[in-house]
Image: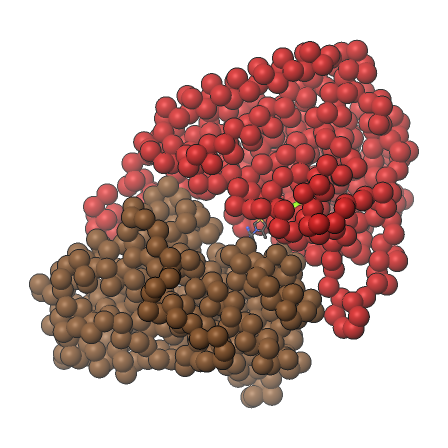
Chain colours: A brown, B red
């Protein structure tokens, strides 16, 4: 998946001279996760470069470049380090178009690895998407596989609104279904790892049905898509699994269509539960599918604690927890 | 690498367009630091602590050095320490290095998830610890483990944290090396760079408000000076004349980014203090005596109610950023050995030998003794568990202390977790 993300930026840099890529360690080194490997060599030092350790500064100058007419793509090294940039994101980028009645806007993309599974402790594991989906004016995208990662990132870069592009770091080098005690797999041979070389887009705001099923709908994104697929297989429950891909704008039609058919819904994310994006999903399902529901909507999430280093696998909502929720939901 | 030729460097532009700083050497290059101007040891005068900061602005651009190439202490900044204090410092630096080596080895064996060494920078923390009072409060980064070791904090307690084992006082919640010890005056290390710097100023303001004599000291890396917190710290320290020693550890690198990416190409890091009216000193960070002397000077100022001091410790990160890093991808393999300011342990050793207070035999005996002490502590710690094999603190403990009292929603989640 990391190569797909790299390729998306490569394509964008090639096709649009206004694209600029920067962030901590992204230039000569190619990023601590290697997402920008080779891009500086190919596109030049003044289009792909290192930034000071100043997340607020990185997003601020991106907003300024956007006002000039550039299309900045910035990397925040870990989503856990995005908080110093929240003022620029929430008060500035998100509202630029609105407060100027369209005179200015912020066509910026903020890429950032998120999520656990690498023993990163509380400051290399967080899933802060819910903080940003709460803000009017920001789009939030989370891919779950290499094909989508490239197509969605190209679409995000080409989008004229500010987009947060959270990359599930545990999926960078292979699919991961939460079975941390099994051998690590890589992407080779995976159907969604066939990534075309050139330009293509996966439109923002479109969910994808990863598995069709009749018993229950699972709403997932990022790493949890793979956990959900494993849980469906291991329980034998005929779950319909939706990969939301974009949280804002959300593909409500796809959700409603599926839940009306199955009559049951489980929402899953790695982020903490209270006021997480699952709360919004659960409310929407209740508003739009109430008369079709045969069981309460279940939420499977990270616990409402910081991400504990040594207890990563007690925190991570793995296939066992999801399986239990699926059983509970279909047995109700 | 900053040096006094920054004026001419400022004129060099990428052609055409945006200026992107580049380090002098990349992999494959032959590093040559002969262009760095190093004033001889003893060349810089030591002002009295109550000097008007505007009279000593040049100290932010010079380099305070005490130990010369022959191992002699020179000039007014020589703190004239008795041999037993020097040996204490030497021992703590050597212990720090032995501890780092062992912890990297166990990380490679999968017994812990991560580790960060401070190789080549041992004097930064150890000399400061000896110059400060034991009850002064330290706000470190992850590279000042030497503070704990110089304050004789038990090795095994640090190892338990690195292993996240059943003896870990932080209950397996933090990544390795993010220690915390209230008893040792060592503030909890954050993963988020820079946050401790401004907090240290707050601690110092509180101490001043109480009329206390305790002061605070903080450390930040060259790279992290770009964070807002660095600027908050200088602003508040200046406005309230807080009793705080603000250290910038310029080890030339921030992961793969050289100091120029943090603004080090245009001026020294120490010079940032000038605009705030804060006395700002630049010191040879590999010179134990010089680091001790400037810290003592700054601490005396703070304790006398004369306000904050900014210190740039000019040093070099001799090893990788962390166990996740491979520095050969972005800098020449020979760069560490080409660094002109030498190794802090060897320099202090040579000084003690010159004084006649130490011998090469004593040195190697101590080296073995410390390696043995670290090995013994490691065995003891591993008996309490490792990340790989446990035992750990019971998992249910991670629901505790999110709040002082566990609120009902967490009580419900703890029950739901089955832990
Ligand atoms: C707010 C924040 N942004 C980014 C990071 C990732 N990061 C960890 S260490 C580091 C480099 C720090 O360099 P420097 O401040 O020079 O300290 P050194 O490692 O050299 O001691 C970076 C970018 C972080 N931990 N926190
Ligand atoms: Mg540094």
Nearest to the observer: residue B15 or residue A94 = B15
- Snapshot quadrant of residue B207: top right
- Snapshot quadrant of residue A170: bottom left
Q: Name the residue: 73% across, 20% down.
A: B349
Q: Name the residue: 69% across, 30% down.
A: B123
| Residue at the extreme left of the image, as rendered | A331
Percent coordinates x, y for residue B97 in the rendering: 60, 28
Quarter occupied by the C terminus of chain A: bottom left
Quarter occupied by the N terminus of chain A: bottom left
Nearest to the observer: residue A225 or residue B189 = A225
Label count reads 0
Percent coordinates x, y for residue B103 in the rendering: 50, 31
> In the picture provided, is A102 more to the left or to the right than B163?
right
Residue A264 seen in render: no
Residue A252 seen in render: yes
Q: Name the residue: 62% across, 46% down.
A: B327
Percent coordinates x, y for residue A196 in the rendering: 44, 75
Q: Name the residue: 57% across, 15% down.
A: B369
Percent coordinates x, y for residue B145 in the rendering: 58, 33
- Snapshot quadrant of residue A134: bottom left
> In the picture provided, is B393 more to the left or to the right than B132?
left
């Amino acid at each position: 998946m990391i190569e797909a993300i790299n390729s998306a930026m490569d394509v964008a840099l090639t096709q649009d001279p206004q694209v600029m890529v920067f962030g901590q360690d992204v230039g000569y080194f190619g990023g601590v996760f290697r997402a920008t490997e080779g891009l500086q060599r190919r596109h030049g030092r003044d289009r792909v470069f290192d930034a000071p350790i100043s997340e607020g500064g990185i997003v601020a100058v991106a907003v300024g470049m956007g006002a000039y007419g550039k299309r900045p793509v910035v990397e925040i090294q870990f989503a856990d380090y995005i908080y110093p940039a929240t003022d620029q994101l929430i008060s500035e980028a998100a509202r630029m178009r609105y407060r100027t009645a369209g005179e200015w806007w912020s066509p910026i993309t903020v890429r950032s690895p998120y999520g656990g599974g690498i023993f990163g402790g509380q400051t290399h594991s967080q899933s802060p998407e819910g903080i940003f989906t709460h803000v009017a004016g920001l789009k939030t995208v989370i891919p779950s596989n290499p094909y989508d990662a490239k197509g969605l990132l190209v679409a995000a870069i080409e989008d004229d609104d500010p987009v947060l592009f959270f990359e599930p770091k545990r999926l960078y080098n292979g699919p991961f279904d939460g079975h941390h005690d099994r051998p690590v797999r890589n992407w080779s041979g995976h159907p969604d790892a066939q990534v075309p070389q050139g330009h293509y887009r996966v439109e923002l705001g479109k969910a994808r049905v990863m598995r069709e099923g009749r018993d229950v709908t699972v709403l997932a994104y990022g790493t949890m898509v793979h956990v959900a697929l494993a849980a469906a297989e291991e329980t034998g429950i005929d779950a319909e699994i939706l990969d939301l891909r974009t949280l804002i704008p959300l593909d409500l039609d796809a959700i409603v269509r599926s839940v009306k058919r199955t009559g049951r819904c489980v929402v899953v994310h790695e982020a903490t539960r209270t006021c997480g994006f699952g709360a919004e999903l659960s409310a929407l399902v209740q508003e739009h599918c109430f008369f079709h529901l045969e069981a309460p909507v279940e939420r499977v999430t990270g616990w409402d604690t910081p991400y504990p280093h040594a207890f990563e696998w007690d925190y991570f909502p793995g296939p066992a927890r999801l399986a239990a929720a699926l059983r509970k939901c279909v047995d109700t | 690498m900053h040096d006094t030729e920054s004026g001419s460097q400022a004129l060099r532009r990428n052609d055409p367009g945006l200026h992107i700083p580049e380090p002098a050497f990349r992999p494959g290059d032959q590093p040559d630091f002969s262009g760095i101007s190093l004033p001889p040891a003893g060349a810089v005068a030591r002002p009295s602590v109550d000097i008007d900061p505007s009279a000593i602005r040049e100290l932010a651009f010079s380099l305070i050095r005490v130990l010369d190439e022959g191992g002699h202490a020179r000039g007014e900044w020589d703190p004239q320490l008795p041999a037993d204090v020097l040996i204490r410092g030497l021992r703590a630096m050597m212990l720090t290095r032995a501890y780092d080596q062992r912890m990297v080895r166990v990380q490679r064996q999968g017994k812990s998830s991560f580790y960060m060494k401070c190789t080549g920078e041992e004097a930064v923390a150890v000399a400061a610890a000896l110059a400060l009072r034991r009850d002064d409060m330290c706000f470190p980064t992850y590279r000042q483990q030497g503070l704990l070791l110089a304050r004789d904090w038990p090795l095994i307690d640090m190892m338990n944290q690195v292993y996240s084992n059943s003896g870990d006082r932080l209950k397996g919640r933090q990544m390795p090396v993010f220690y915390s010890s209230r008893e040792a005056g060592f503030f909890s290390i954050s993963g988020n760079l820079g946050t401790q710097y401004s907090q240290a100023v707050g601690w110092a303001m509180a101490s001043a408000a109480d009329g206390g004599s305790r002061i605070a000291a903080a450390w930040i890396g060259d790279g992290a000076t770009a964070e807002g917190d660095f600027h908050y710290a200088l602003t508040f320290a200046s406005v309230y004349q807080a009793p705080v020693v603000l250290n910038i550890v310029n080890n030339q690198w921030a992961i793969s980014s050289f100091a120029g990416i943090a603004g080090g190409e245009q001026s020294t890091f120490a010079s940032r203090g000038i605009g705030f009216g804060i006395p700002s000193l630049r010191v040879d960070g590999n010179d134990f005596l010089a680091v001790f002397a400037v810290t003592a000077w700054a601490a005396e100022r703070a304790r006398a109610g004369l306000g904050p001091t900014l210190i740039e410790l000019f040093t070099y990160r001799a090893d990788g950023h962390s166990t996740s890093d491979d520095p050969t991808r972005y800098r020449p393999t020979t760069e560490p050995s080409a660094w002109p300011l030498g190794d802090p342990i060897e320099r202090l050793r040579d000084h003690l030998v010159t004084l006649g207070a130490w011998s090469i035999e004593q040195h190697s005996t101590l080296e073995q003794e410390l390696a043995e002490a670290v090995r013994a502590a490691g065995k003891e710690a591993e008996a309490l568990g490792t990340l790989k094999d446990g035992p750990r603190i019971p998992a249910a403990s991670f629901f505790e202390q999110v709040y002082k009292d566990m609120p009902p929603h967490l009580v419900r989640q703890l029950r739901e977790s089955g832990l």
